[in-house]
Amino acid sequence: MTALLALWRVMRVVAHVMGGLWTLRFQFAALSFHERQARVQSWSRRMLRLMGVRLLVHGEAPEGAGLLLSNHISWLDIVVINAARPSRFVAKSDIRHWPVIGRLVEGSGAVFIEREKRRDAMRVVHHVAERLRAGDVVAVFPEGTTGDGCGLLPFHANLLQAAVVTDAPAWPLGLRYSDARDGSRHDAPTYVGDTTLVASLWRTLRQTGLQAEVRWGEPDTAQGRDRRTWSEALRLQIAELLDLPLSD
């Protein structure tokens, strides 16, 4: 039965993705900034429903521009965060080449970074600073990779420099996947190690009672701190939001 449910969900998800690509191709450019955000949020929320994932949001999303920092567990994180608060993501350059998903991420305004090239981080910092000055919300995963959800990996502080130079607030966000029956951590969407994207997607679509929980922290500003000191304070806040230990 779970396999039949997953196949049904696959068909509906594919149709929804095709509709998203059509919107990007023929409508997105003509929409205003606020209309685009509304479309992205509506599309993301429907995607979660079609996948059988319930969205739970704890706290209120801040208003205005800001640098959103979240822990990173899965490819699904981008959909979940956009469902809670539409954002312009900083994503690894290889995501651009993912079938279909890469086109959607790129079309939504993502900024791609080549993490293996240290000089590329400076280019992205300048670009993120420009978007913050323009009033955007820019989302980053400061761990730099996905984790298993059992602990919070060390943060890379480079991109936080964009918020330092623009005096923009940072928005800490805690993200976890849980079982609706007892609230325990759910591993299905996890995308770590040798797990393939297809395997993780199929495992997620087979689930019932899967929840995506978003917990908003308090917006914070640099207040004279350098990016590394500020980054560690934000890491501690996200760890507290999720009641997670700090990992090495």
Image: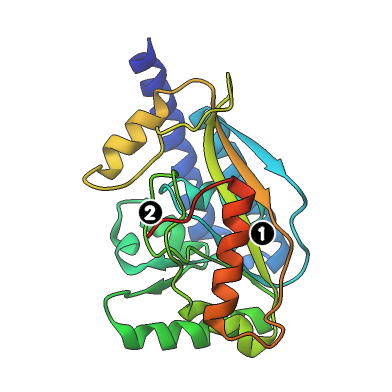
Q: How far apart are the alpha carbons under marks 2 and 1? A: 25 Å
Give the mark toward the camera: 2 or 1: 2
Q: Which mark is residue 146?
A: 2
160 or 66, nearer to the observer:
160
Residue 74 image point, x, y percent: 41, 47
Report x, y in % for residue 135.
70, 76
User: Is the residue marked by circle 2 packed among few (<14), some (14-19), or many (20+) residues within 10 Å?
Assistant: some
Quarter in which the C terminus is drawn: bottom left
Of 48 and 225, the residue lying toward us: 225
Compared to residue 123, the image places residue 90 above or below, namely above
Residue at image position (40%, 72%) is: 112
Question: Which amino acid type corresponds to the residue marked 1 in the rendered image?
Answer: Gln
Tell me the residue at 48%/67% (across/down): 110
* Quadrant where the N terminus is found in the figure: top left
| Other-residue count near label 1 (Cα within 10 Å), few / some / many at <14 / 14–19 / ≥20 | some
Amino acid found under the numbered disc labelled 2: Thr
Judged from the image, the secondary structure of the residue bearing numbered disc 2 is loop
The residue pinned by badge 1 equals 37
The picture places residue 11, in percent across and down from the top left corner, at 40, 28
Residue at the outermost left position: 194
The answer to which image quadrant residue 66 occupies is bottom right
Q: Is residue 130 visible?
A: no
